[in-house]
Image (spheres, helix red, strand yellow):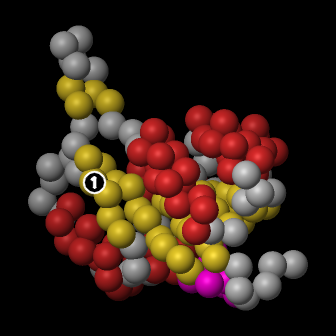
Amino acid sequence: MLKGNKRVGVFVDVANLAGAARRVYGGAVDYRRLLHLVVAGKNLSGAFAFAIDKGTSGYDAFAVALREAGYKVFTKRPKTFADGSVKADWDVGITVEMLSMQSKLDVVVLGSGDGDFVPAVHHLRQKGLRVEVAAFTERSAKELLAAADGFIELDESVLEDPSKN
């Protein structure tokens, strides 16, 4: 069992969790609830949300809400390639931030079900950190869950209350 003095860093792949919540429950993640759930009993050293700004009118308010919930927000815009394809993901950015924080943490909570993070999880564990994945089971890569020390299963309890919108 983890003691309360463990320093935890929370790294949230907003697009991954938002997409999973929408597909599994038809809802939206309440990032304040998420943070309370994953930090319970630990000493929060930093919470980082990695989001995609698609240029929609509501993004600025969303980023403000993330900041008010306690996250440092990293934003990027999607890239459009010559063939018309569009790509926007934070896998490398999240990994770099986790690695840059590793000496200041005892526990890393990765809010994502993306299997691309397996090498980063292995590295962090080899450096002596505990790595917990917080994600929706139905949208999580089995290899990511197997690589982590622990799994925080997300469900309806971390969704926004639709009556408040």
Q: Is residue 92 visible?
A: yes
The residue located at (79%, 85%) in the rendering is: 3
**Residue at the limit of the structure toward the top, as seen here:** 83
In the picture as drawn, the residue positioned furthest to the right comes out as: 1
Q: Amino acid at mark 1?
A: Thr
* Residue under the point 21% across and 61% down: 59
The range drawn in magenta is: 36-43
Percent across and percent down for residue 103 are: 60, 62
- Residue shown at 73% from the left, 52% from the top: 127
Number of numbered tags placed on the structure image: 1
* Image position, residue 147 (x, y; %): 78, 45
Using the rendered image of the protein, determine whether residue 111 is visible from the camera's viewpoint: no
Q: Which corner quadrant of the image does residue 102 belong to?
A: bottom right
Q: Nearer the viewer, residue 161 or 66?
A: 66
In front of the other: 52 or 136: 52
Circle 1 crowding by C-alpha within 10 Å: few under 14, some 14–19, many from 20:
some
Relative image position of residue 53 (x, y in whole percent): 23, 51
Identify the residue at the far front of this view.
103
Please check the rendered image and state whether residue 142 is part of the magenta-colored stretch, yes or no: no
User: Circle 1 sits in a helix, a strand or a loop, which is it?
Assistant: strand
Q: Quadrant of the C terminus?
A: bottom left
Q: Quadrant of residue 108?
A: bottom right
Locate the N terminus and report the quarter of the image it occupies: bottom right
Mark 1 lies on residue: 75
